[in-house]
Amino acid sequence: DAKTTQPTSMDCAEGRAANLPCNHSTISGNEYVYWYRQIHSQGPQYIIHGLKNNETNEMASLIITEDRKSSTLILPHATLRDTAVYYCIGGDSGGSNYKLTFGKGTLLTVNP
Amino acid sequence: DADVTQTPRNRITKTGKRIMLECSQTKGHDRMYWYRQDPGLGLRLIYYSFDVKDINKGEISDGYSVSRQAQAKFSLSLESAIPNQTALYFCATDPGGTGELFFGEGSRLTVL
């Protein structure tokens, strides 16, 4: 599964867009990019995933570069409740060889 | 009620004791997982099961065993608990290779 690199921490002002970067230069052609977040010590929550096209849902947008070596998760209007650890995962959840490995993630702190 | 329920939520035990953590889900998903999280680290996969007759080791299965009693139930056992198994344990499900995992609230285990 692809190794991902994320900044350890980031800050964002409430109401502003939070842009969380992720490098996944070793991602293979059939591996997706997944984003999860974990608020305090709760169970992680799925946010979004994509293969090569940009994706948007009610929580966030995912921008994947054309070469698929990096991506950015965008929270368009960050709130205090978005303070969490965000995990970027490159992996393949299909087939018989399950590969979703959670790294250390990025601690996003949304400030008032 | 939570879709993925873990019991117990907190447990303190002594070295050498046998411990079972239970997970039950009402989502009707075939796939279930057990993860472990240590402070400041990401989640590491212990075991996973794609259906009732399927059990697979994850990256850190030594010292653990699992039982998939039914589609809805997946238990994690520590046959002889040791202090370095002190951690937060999460159960998760997914509907079938989508990568959208649904996590329980976690079971905090302390081994003295």
Image (tube, coloured by chain):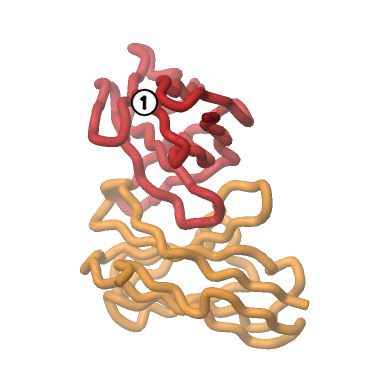
Chain colours: A red, B orange
Q: How many marks?
A: 1
Question: Outermost residue, front direction?
Answer: A112
Q: Relative to B73, is B42 on the left or the right?
A: right
Q: Residue A28 sits in which quadrant?
A: top left
Query: For the point 56% across and 41% down, which residue is it?
Result: A103
Instruction: Residue B22 in the image: state x and y as whole percent.
Output: 45, 79
Which of these two is toward me, B95 or A12?
A12
Q: Chain of mark 1?
A: A
* Secondary structure beneath label 1: loop
In the picture of the structure, the residue carrying the numbered disc 1 is A77
- The C terminus of chain B sits in image quarter: bottom right
Which of these two is toward me, A33 or A94?
A33
Residue A52, placed above or below residue B38: above
Q: Relative to A8, is A80 on the left or the right?
A: left
Residue A26, placed above or below residue B62: above
Question: Outermost residue, top direction?
Answer: A66
What amino acid is found at the position of numbered circle 1 in the picture? Answer: His
